Every structure is written in structure tokens, then in C-alpha cells.
Image (cartoon, rainbow, N blue to C red):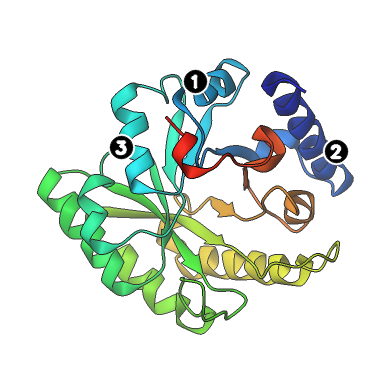
């Protein structure tokens, strides 16, 4: 299928998942995960109706920005962010989805302060408690959210998670359900910031329909839009 057909197919699946769970399709955003995609592929996706791109790697983000590949769409950073690369991301994306530690949060705050802006962020939660993944322990989410709320140059917009990989259909629904409850709890507990906390980013190509059923407001989809990823060296 063409990229346009793939975009339409993913949006149709999203709409069906929303409607079957009593939700409005327009309340769930589609973030095209553009990892290892070329400038031309990203432009084609935007021409096909993609309005939000998510980038995993700082090097690819800066290259695509320099080439103007994201023109016509908003950009989120969705991958692991090292503190020494914060200056290349803060102020250059609409939202950083992967803030999962106090150290990174403070680095984002410091860079945003230098630039005189407020950076929107999500707190990444290690919902599966996996040693191989970043993100805050669910038990430590509340203190990190309170710190984020207290900082003048970041704005907490919600939560993000990448649950454990499973080949079994529906296996991640318990993790998605736990994330939704954390999202609800944080919105309630951060009552004076409630209007800003509106994003629950979870679900990817293999499980975004389950994520929508459990309350996701944003899904990050790559393979279902672009097909299998090309090798790193072919991305231009």
C-alpha cells in the first residue's frame, strides 16, 4: 500500500478501536514514529495527512529539522534522551515524551531557562519495571510529577510508557490499564495543573488498539505506517 493508504488504514483502525470502547476518534492523536525514515518519506507522510511526527534519535531529529522535513507537522521527541543532548532538543520540539528521571528533568529545566521558554514534557513511566528500559518507577511518579510542576520552565502535559514486548494479543492491556489509572491519579492530585495534563501516550504498531481501549490519548505508530524499518545507513 502507499503511505496515504497506510495512514488511512491506521486511522480507520484507531477510529474503530475508539468507537468500540465508547470513545470519540478525534480524542486520540496519531504520532507517526519516523525512526530511520528518510526526509522524503516523512514529507510524503505529512502530505498524506500526518500532523504529528515522533523522533527517537537526536541525530536524526536535528538532520530532519535542518532539511525542513517536518514542515507542516508538529514534532515530538519520543526516544531515550541523554542529558548531554538536551540542548539539541529543548525548544526544538513541541513535546519531549521521555522524561523519566529527576536528573533529566532538571537538565531540561536548565536548558529551557537558558532559552527563556517553557518546554512541554511527558513523564515516562517504567510500567513493566524492566531493567533494560528507562522511566520512573510507578511508586516514584508522584514526587517526580510534583517536582515537574514546581519548575518554572517545564510544563507537565501527561505520561508516557512502553510496556514489555509480548507476542500474545492483549497481553499489554493490564499495563495500559495501570497507566490509565496513574494518569487519572496524577490529574486528580495535581489539581491546580489539571487543565495541562491531558496526554497519555501509549501503544505502538502491535498494540495501539488495546491502548486506545484502555484510555490512550496518543499512540506512536511506525511500522504500521511505513512498513519494516530500513537499515540505519539508508536514512537520508
The quarter of the rendered structure image containing the N terminus is top right
Image point 52% across, 33% down: which residue? 52
Task: State the image coordinates of residue 47 (x, y, percent, origin top left).
Answer: 57, 15
Q: Is residue 45 visible?
A: yes
The quarter of the rendered structure image containing the C terminus is top left
Asked whether the beta carbons under mark 3 and mark 2 sit within 8 Å of each other, the answer is no
Label 1, secondary structure: give it.
Answer: helix
Q: Is residue 150 visible?
A: no
Q: Name the residue nearer the viewer: 145 or 84.
A: 84
Please rate how many residues cluster around mark 2, counting C-alpha atoms within 10 Å: few if below 14, some from 14 to 19, many from 20. Answer: some
Mark 3 lies on residue: 62
Mark 1 lies on residue: 40
Image point 42% across, 26% down: which residue? 70
Q: Looking at the image, which residue sits at the far bottom?
A: 139
User: Mark 2 or 1 closer to N-term?
Assistant: 2
Image point 58% across, 53% down: which residue? 201
Mark 2 lies on residue: 16
Residue 85 has which mark?
Answer: none
Position of 50 with respect to 39 (left or right) is: right
User: Mark 3 or 1 closer to N-term?
Assistant: 1
Point out the frontmost of discs 2 and 1.
Answer: 1
Task: State the image coordinates of residue 126 (x, y, percent, origin top left).
Answer: 54, 73
Point out the frontmost of discs 3 and 2.
Answer: 3
Amino acid at each position: 500500500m502507499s503511505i496515504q493508504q497506510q495512514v488511512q488504514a491506521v486511522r480507520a483502525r484507531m477510529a474503530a478501536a475508539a468507537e468500540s470502547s465508547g470513545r470519540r476518534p478525534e480524542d486520540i492523536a496519531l504520532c507517526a514514529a519516523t525512526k530511520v525514515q528518510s526526509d522524503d518519506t516523512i514529507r510524503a507522510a505529512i502530505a498524506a495527512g500526518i500532523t504529528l511526527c515522533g523522533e527517537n534519535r537526536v541525530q536524526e531529529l536535528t538532520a530532519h529539522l535542518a532539511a525542513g522535513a517536518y514542515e507542516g507537522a508538529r514534532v515530538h521527541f519520543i526516544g531515550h534522551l541523554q542529558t548531554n543532548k538536551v540542548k539539541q532538543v529543548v525548544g526544538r520540539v513541541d513535546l519531549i515524551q521521555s522524561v523519566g528521571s529527576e536528573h533529566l528533568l532538571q537538565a531540561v529545566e536548565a536548558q529551557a531557562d537558558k532559552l527563556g521558554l517553557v518546554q512541554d514534557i511527558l513523564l515516562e513511566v517504567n510500567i513493566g519495571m524492566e531493567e533494560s528500559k528507562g522511566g520512573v518507577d510507578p511508586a516514584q511518579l508522584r514526587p517526580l510529577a510534583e517536582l515537574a510542576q514546581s519548575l518554572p520552565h517545564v510544563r507537565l502535559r501527561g505520561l508516557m510508557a512502553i510496556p514489555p514486548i509480548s507476542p500474545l494479543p492483549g497481553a499489554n492491556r493490564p499495563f495500559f490499564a495501570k497507566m490509565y489509572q496513574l494518569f487519572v491519579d496524577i490529574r486528580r492530585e495535581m489539581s491546580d495543573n489539571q487543565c495541562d495534563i491531558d496526554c497519555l501516550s501509549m501503544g505502538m504498531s502491535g498494540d495501539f488498539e488495546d491502548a486506545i481501549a484502555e484510555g490512550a490519548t496518543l499512540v506512536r505508530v511506525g511500522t504500521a505506517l511505513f512498513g519494516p524499518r530500513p537499515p540505519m545507513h539508508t536514512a537520508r
